Image: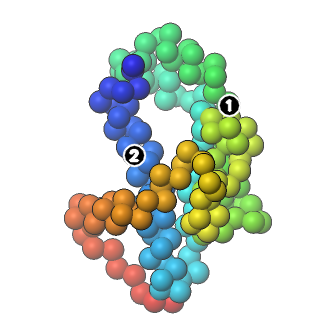
Amino acid sequence: MWLATGTWVRYHQTKLAQPIFTFALHDRLRSLGSHVQVLSVDPGGAATNLQTTSHGSGAMTSLEARFIFSASQSADDGALPSLVACFGPEARSGDFYTPKSGLTGPPVAVAKEGVFKNGCAESNSAHVPSREVLWAASEKAVGPFKFQAA
């Protein structure tokens, strides 16, 4: 299956790393009493240049690109989880917004203040040991992150 190839494995690893890192940052900021808000979003399936460039680079066939594109929501709708996270009156640090079906639909919170709803696909981001491993690897790559208490 084309999603199991090297390019797509790396893509999915980065898609998973983003909320894990965000929740690790949320944990650290809360432990310091910070009022900085960190939220995570997933646009779901959005019809963007990803399909075009993936086909152009050989990462997927034109048939696969057309299928993904046809099953996706618009790029504008894919931006909605980000907009809700930034401007939604109920958005709080540690929230994770994604389309209702996971791929399409209105944005919903699958995590509130770092706590995931039962059974959601994104709940693997809640794995605290993964947060610690990713945080340590990130600091090894770029140097220690320094925070001051609020």
Q: Which label is found at residue 74? A: 1
- Quadrant hosting residue 102: top right
Q: Residue at x 77, y 66 (%)?
A: 89
Q: Is residue 144 visible?
A: yes
Q: Is residue 7 left or right of residue 86?
A: left
Q: In the rendered view, does 83 fall on the left or right side of 34?
A: right
Identify which residue is drawn at 68% across, 55% down.
109
Residue lying farthest to the left in this orientation: 140
From the image, tell me which residue sits under label 2.
14
Judged from the image, the secondary structure of the residue bearing numbered disc 1 is strand
Q: Secondary structure at mark 2?
A: helix
* Residue 135 in view in this figure: no
The amino acid type of the residue labelled 1 equals Ser
Percent position (x, y) of residue 99?
A: 67, 42
Quadrant of the frame with the N terminus:
top left
Mark 2–mark 1 distance (CA, rounded to whole Å): 22 Å
Residue at (54, 49) in percent of width and height: 122
Q: Name the residue at 63% across, 27% down.
A: 72
Q: Quadrant of residue 79?
A: top right
Position of residue 142 relative to residue 100, above or below, is: below
What number is the disc on residue 36?
A: none
